[in-house]
Amino acid sequence: MRTLGLLLTMFALAATPAAAAPWSSPAPIPGAPDAVPVLAESAGGPQAVYWGTFDPTKLQSPITAFVSVLGTGPTPQPAAKLSPSLNVSQAALYGNRHVALATFGNATVKVPGSLVGVATGPLKGPMKTHALPAEVRSLAGNAAGDLAVMIEHCATNVGGCHPSAPAVVLDRPGRGFGDPITLDRKGHSFGGSLAIDAHGRVLAAWDRAGVVYARFVSIKGKLSPIQRLGTDTGGGFNVVLSNDGRAAVGWTTQTFSTATAPAVFAAKLAVAGASGHFGATRTLETGQLTGTQSSIPYQGVVIKLPAGEPGLAAWTGYDGAHFTVRAAPIDGTTVGAPQTVSTPGTDTILADAAEGSRGQAVILLLPGQAGADPTGTIAPAGMVAVTHPAGTQTFGLPEEVVPGPAYVASAAVSIDAATGSVFATWRDVGSPAGWAVRAPLG
């Protein structure tokens, strides 16, 4: 009986988040309302948080955008209003503390996905808006001041969208935005994304007619051959370029449940070495979503590839009864064995992940949540993190970041290169946008 009691005690300790000591107490970003924070980070780590506010009772309500620049710590500074008013959905840092923001052209609430331009300028503005010929899918920048934007007209096969082709627009220092560089022939697609490295090499990935493709673009606009990576049935993309020459494309596929068939999902990953050739695509996980859970959430897979270090793949999976979060190392271009980092028997989904320049890593988890569109009961339990220091790829026990029963709807995390501190920001529904900092990882 004593042995059984000891085993039960050990199990309880393993299933309970550790003390919140590594993390500072959750705090509101000064001046922020209940908003979705958009984190802007450079190769050196987190730099600023952006968000927008509007009157939810008015369909065409003007949007007011704000920024909180991160100071020492990193610590959010009081909110500053951006000029002109913008609806911020994505942010990319480039050059010397400049930012590009994906935005609606007329700064009013419209249908999600109808982005028609970007705004550029210093972190606190003023911003200069640039109209583009199609909606913004993704944007990325580097320290040299190069900026890349993926654009494409509404191209899904639902909602009356016509076939379209993805394109990349490049902005080089002193030259402004060039003409769109078409990546593929027209077709129906669900998404796409891109990344840019320190030398200006761009990698774009997209889907067309259920197939995922990737293509490199030089900073001068030269296109490499299109590479076919695998299949897709409507999911999110995560595109990564490492400054050591490696590249990776992660994505999720998803069908939706019907009266006669369950939903089928998969998380997939393709990795390329310095040659730029992608090897065979790795299926990280596949399965069927049963019961009332109908889809894997928005941040289905996150990939990190710091130069000269093993990379990280993190994704939301399903064990047949519960949503779960797993992680696997990327050694060179080889994906290692997965580790389940969420608490067994508890529905948990992935919020975000980050990896530092020395290989230290953190994953944010949202326990108590069971998919993006559940019809059953959600029992949100705040947010926890799992971490590992440099020199290992094994994650430790969960650390409490936001205590339950807070409902964290979205979150972002980044590691400060100078101090090693971990910065997290999130939306806690019904409360001001929050933040916390973790002590440096060893």
Image: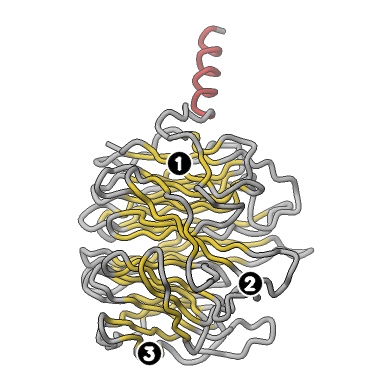
Q: Nearer the viewer, residue 267 or 368?
A: 368
- The answer to whether mark 3 and mark 1 are in CB contact below 8 A is no
Q: Residue at x 23, y 64 (%)?
A: 243
Q: Position of residue 31 (x, y in %)?
A: 53, 51
Mark 3 or 1, closer to the camera: 1
Q: Nearer the viewer, residue 105 or 214?
A: 105
Alpha carbons under labels 3 and 1: distance apart: 40 Å
Residue with the most extreme right position: 259
Q: Position of residue 327 (x, y in %)?
A: 42, 48
Mark 2 or 3, closer to the camera: 2
Q: Which residue is mark 3?
A: 181
Q: Secondary structure at mark 2?
A: loop
Quadrant, the N terminus: top right
Q: Secondary structure at mark 1?
A: strand
Q: Quadrant of residue 306?
A: bottom left
Tell me which numbered mark, 3 or 1, is placed earlier along the sequence.
Answer: 3
Q: Which residue is mark 1?
A: 436
Tell me which numbered mark, 2 or 1, is placed earlier along the sequence.
Answer: 2
Q: Secondary structure at mark 3?
A: strand
Quadrant, the C terminus: top left
Q: Can you tell which mark lies on residue 62?
A: 2
Disc 2: CA contacts within 10 A as few (<14), some (14-19) or many (>=20) = some
Q: Residue at x 60, y 69 (%)?
A: 63
Alpha carbons under labels 2 and 3: distance apart: 32 Å
Q: Position of residue 55 (x, y in %)?
A: 69, 64
Q: Is residue 424 above or below residue 90?
A: above
Q: Residue at x 46, y 50 (%)?
A: 78
Query: Is residue 406 at least partly visible in the picture?
Result: yes
Q: Position of residue 212 (x, y in %)?
A: 46, 76
Q: Is residue 424 left or right of residue 144?
A: right
